Image (cartoon, grey):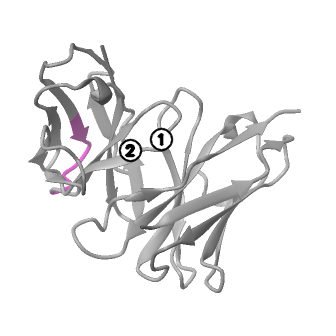
């Protein structure tokens, strides 16, 4: 099983600041990594796939990078609605795994 | 615009079987794997497994012995059964869609609204 480790667990920032969230895979996964945003009481929402491609309707302030084992999600200038929990996710060997999440708080 | 609508019993006793169903509206049923994911309150996401329209399944090894998924192509529905539940199975359960092909093939790009399942004696 491929383990995804996210850091930090919690990131405290202010609106307008830049956020960088990290996800590390226990072995190389190429660019087969996705990022999701989850707000309280809601299902997760796909933000990024193939490590760096924004899903439909996702604002340009969200960007993804990385390949192999090290990945990042960057939010260039935080808006109030961006404060949420973010998960990375991969699929390989017929299984899906998620990172444990990063809480982005004001 | 695809919609996933899910339902099932919300309160179970230990040792009972959890049963949830997810219906797919407004999209193809053939070109996807249909997934179940759960999330205990205040915790992260755990993948349970997936099934395609042919009935081919992939399960989380940690749950495989207790999980059964099925599909009803006539109704565009798929279901989850988890037997012998304990308090540790208390969680929000989500259904979700994973495309079979293309750049998004590894992702869960549409989700149901979630069903809260509580296991308590």
Question: Is disc 2 surrounded by few (<14), some (14 to 19) or many (20+) residues within 10 Å?
Answer: many
User: Do we see residue B59 in this rendering?
Assistant: no
Q: Which residue is mark 1?
A: B45
Asked if A82 appears above or below A36 in the picture, the reply is: above
Q: Quadrant of the N terminus of chain B?
A: bottom left
Asked if B3 appears above or below A22 in the picture, the reply is: below
Q: Specify the subunit that label 2 lies on.
A: A
Q: Specify the subunit that label 1 lies on.
A: B
Question: Is disc 1 surrounded by few (<14), some (14 to 19) or many (20+) residues within 10 Å?
Answer: many
Q: Quadrant of residue A69?
A: top left
Q: Tell me the element at label 1.
A: loop
Q: Position of residue B69 (x, y in %)?
A: 64, 68
Q: Quadrant of the C terminus of chain B?
A: top right
Q: Quadrant of residue A49?
A: bottom left
Between the C-alphas of marks 2 and 1, the distance is 6 Å
Q: Residue at x 31, y 28 (%)?
A: A81
The region drawn magenta spans A23-30
The reply, left or right, for residue B2 in relation to residue A80 is right
Q: Position of residue A106 (x, y in %)?
A: 30, 13
Q: Are marks 2 and 1 in contact (CB under 8 Å)?
A: yes
Q: Quadrant of residue B80?
A: bottom right
Task: Say if the magenta span includes residue A27.
Answer: yes
The one nearer the camera, B57 or A84, is: A84
On residue B63, which mark appears?
A: none
User: Do we see residue B69 in this rendering?
Assistant: yes
The reply, left or right, for residue B20 in relation to residue B112 is right
């Amino acid at each position: 099983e491929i383990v995804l480790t996210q850091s930090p667990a919690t990131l405290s920032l202010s609106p307008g600041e830049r956020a960088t969230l990290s996800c590390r895979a226990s072995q190389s996964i190429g660019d087969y990594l996705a990022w999701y945003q989850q707000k309280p009481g809601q299902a997760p929402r796909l933000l990024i796939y193939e490590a760096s491609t924004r899903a439909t309707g996702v604002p340009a302030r969200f960007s993804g990078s990385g390949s192999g084992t090290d990945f990042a999600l960057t939010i260039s200038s935080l808006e109030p609605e961006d404060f949420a929990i973010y998960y990375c996710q991969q699929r390989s060997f017929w299984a899906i795994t998620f990172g444990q999440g990063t809480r982005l708080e004001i | 615009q695809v919609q996933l609508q899910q339902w099932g019993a919300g309160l179970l006793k230990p040792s009972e079987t959890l049963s949830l169903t997810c219906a797919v509206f407004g999209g193809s049923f053939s070109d996807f794997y249909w997934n179940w994911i759960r999330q205990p309150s205040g915790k992260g996401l755990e993948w349970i497994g997936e099934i395609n329209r042919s009935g081919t399944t992939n399960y989380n090894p940690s749950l495989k012995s207790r999980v059964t998924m099925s599909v009803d192509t006539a109704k565009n529905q798929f279901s989850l059964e988890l037997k012998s539940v304990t308090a540790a199975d208390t969680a929000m359960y989500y259904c979700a869609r994973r495309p079979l092909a293309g750049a998004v093939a590894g992702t869960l790009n549409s989700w149901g609204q979630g069903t809260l399942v509580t296991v308590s004696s």
